[in-house]
Image: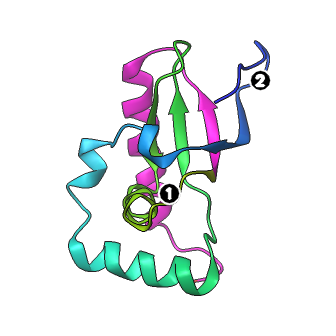
Amino acid sequence: MEDRSKDEKSRIGRVDPALVQDNQVLALSVNRQEVDQSIHFIREYGLLTPPVVGQLRDGSCRVLSGEREFLALREMGVRTTDAVMVLVREQEEMDRLALLLSTLRQAPNPLS
């Protein structure tokens, strides 16, 4: 992952799914069937919605949204994928942002 500008808060970047830490809170809501379904969709249509990854200043990253997709990509052996990279100041901010994003994902959208 690349160095980030001080003014930049988020961007689309390339990440290795194997290097991004799982989000244990999000993982609790993901089951085997959903991962298999994501593998099928990704193979058939590609990754339609990029996952969101929080990145601390030390470069460590954790999934904030898209845990199911990251699990599927890892199982598929994908070495690099697009993700929305969000610069966060501290670990607690990652937790708050992950919870916020999970509520947005459950909200109705034009596709549903």
Mark 1: amino acid:
Leu
Label of residue 104 in the image = 1
Residue at numbered disc 2: 8
| Quarter of the figure with residue 55 | top right
Residue depicted at x 37% and y 64%: 75
- Secondary structure under tag 1 reads helix
The spot of residue 84 in percent (x, y) is 64, 45
- Secondary structure under tag 2 reads loop
Whether the magenta-drawn stretch holds residue 93 is answered as yes
Q: Is residue 4 left or right of residue 83?
A: right
Residue depicted at x 52% and y 33%: 54
Of 88 and 42, the residue lying toward us = 42
Mark 2: amino acid:
Glu
- Magenta region, residue range: 82-111
Q: Quadrant of the N terminus?
A: top right
The spot of residue 24 in percent (x, y) is 24, 43
Task: Of the two numbered discs 1 and 2 on the same chain, state the one appearing first in sequence.
Answer: 2
26 up-or-down from 69: above or below: above
